[in-house]
Image: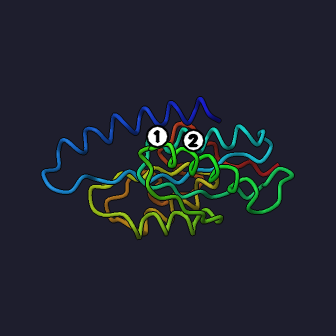
Amino acid sequence: NAPGMKMLGDFVDRVGDSLESSHDLARPSRIGIIATAGDRRDEDMRELGHIAAQHFDVLIVREDVSLRGRERGEVAGFVVEGVRAAMEAGSRCKQVETVLEEIDAVRHAMSRSNRGDLVVVCVDKHGEVMTELESWSSQAQAGSGVNDEVPPADPDYTAPTDS
């Protein structure tokens, strides 16, 4: 939702600013993977994209597995419209891409990032994303060896139930 994206954006700005002050040469990029639920209003989806564009250099728009009544690509399309409108108005974001599948989006973001960049992932399938991220870095800590006995290091994570 838009208020949540605004809070996330403010956090990204604080972290991003601290990264920039610690680098002498190239400015670290802020890369975001964003999505929203399909049961939101079209204008809310556009607004989410518009807000995100104020805080990230590159945005990769994906979709959740459950589209909540929408057609594949429809939700991402509205978010991208908001990002593009913000870009035309001079936002921080200079590039937006659509990669609908979550793991493909994560792989794309990681492959285009450089050491020191800030990559933020708005997650749908937590366990799968953490497993993918662990394969990218021996330094990854959160979710090491995801299983039911040792849940990922995420305070919002709840293990799926068998019911």
Element at badge 2? helix
Q: Quadrant of the N terminus?
A: top right
The relative height of residue 125 versus residue 7 in the rendered view (above or below) is below
Question: Do the numbered discs 2 and 1 sit on residues whose CB atoms are within 8 Å?
Answer: yes
The relative height of residue 41 versus residue 118 in the rendered view (above or below) is above
Q: Is residue 28 left or right of residue 1?
A: left
- In this orientation, which residue lies closer to the viewer: 34 or 138? 34
Q: Which mark is residue 89?
A: none
Q: Is residue 129 left or right of residue 109?
A: right
Residue 112: x, y in percent?
40, 68
**Residue density around tag 1, few if under 14, some if 14–19, many if 20 or more, within 10 Å:** some
Mark 1 = which residue?
54
* Quarter of image, res 157: top right
The relative height of residue 102 versus residue 1 in the rendered view (above or below) is below
Element at badge 1? loop
**Residue density around tag 2, few if under 14, some if 14–19, many if 20 or more, within 10 Å:** many
How many numbered callouts?
2
Measured Cα–Cα span from mark 2 to mark 1: 7 Å
Q: Which residue is rendered at x = 74% and y = 48% of the image? A: 161
Mark 2 = which residue?
50
Q: Is residue 93 left or right of residue 97?
A: left
Q: How is the image coloured?
A: rainbow
* Quarter of image, res 144: bottom left
Q: Which residue is rendered at x = 78% and y = 39% of the image? A: 41
Farthest-out residue, right: 69
Residue 132: x, y in percent?
50, 66
Q: Which residue is rendered at x = 43% and y = 55% of the image? A: 94
Q: Amino acid at mark 1?
A: Gln
Q: Which residue is rendered at x = 41% and y = 70% of the image? A: 111
Q: Amino acid at mark 2?
A: His
- In this orientation, which residue lies closer to the viewer: 78 or 121? 78
